[in-house]
Amino acid sequence: MGITKIMEDTGITSLNILGLGEPTLTMIFDNLASNNLYPSIRVINNLNRTDLIPFRNPLFDITLKPLLEEADREAPCFLGVTKPDLKRKLTALYQCFQLEFINIINKFSFISSTTILGRGAHINSMVSIAAFSTIGDFVSINRNASIGHHTELGDYVTINPGVNIAGFVKINEGVQIGMGVNVFDRIEIGARSVIGAGSVVTRNIPDHVVAYGNPCKIIRSIES
């Protein structure tokens, strides 16, 4: 399965984090610490911002850098943001560098041995991923989320806390699912759609829409 280099390779001493989302950085640090990994962190300001966040964590040696050119080129990389559009923007911005992206997975999560996992995944504490699921590249799954068997999550998908996804579900590229959403079995959610918090998804959702409610209904379209 090759779940995650970050959990298997305890020799990692340095890590580049692309992006400045402070809440996400906190989760990354917590998940590294759960595996007793304390690499030197370089946070790269690459979202065209003029300021660097004043971030501190006593367990890590943190350096703030304005450009990827100042990163440790021998170190693997990770995205410090969770919004699908920002993740997509960052990977597009630096695709020419052929970066090595690793997965960061909290020790207190369960991932079936039959799961196929892409690169750049961020899986927080108490997440459960059942058998024969496929997780794409740069997927973010927040705490206490449950992913059912034979479920497919596309690239750049973000799953917020407390989401429950049943079996044989397909969630396409760039979807963002809000807190506490329940998705029934054999549902498909279209690319880059947003599902509002607390929704109950009982039918398929098309591409590029905002939908929420119980049952979940389309509210408006999203410009491509």
Image (cartoon, grey):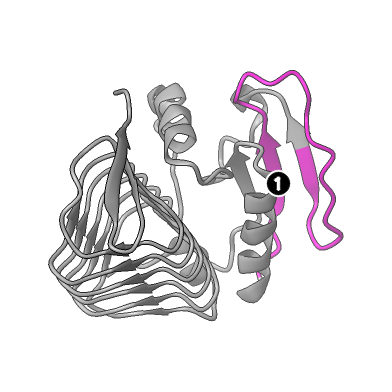
Q: Looking at the image, which is closer to me, 180 or 172?
A: 180
Residue 128's quadrant in the figure? bottom left
Q: Nearer the viewer, residue 160 or 68?
A: 160
Tag 1 residue: 22
- Where are the magenta residues, as a range? 37-63
Residue 186 quadrant: bottom left
Horizontal side of residue 149 vs 119, given as left or right: left
Quadrant location of the C terminus? top left
Magenta stretch, main secondary structure class: loop
Depicted 115 relative to depicted 85: above or below: below
Judge whether residue 51 is colored magenta. Answer: yes
Any magenta on residue 175? Answer: no
In the image, what residue occupies the spot 64% across and 32% down? 71
Q: Residue at x 68, y 52 (%)?
A: 23
Give how far across and how far down residue 114 sits, in percent. Answer: 22, 77
The residue nearer to you, when weighing 138 against 218, is: 218
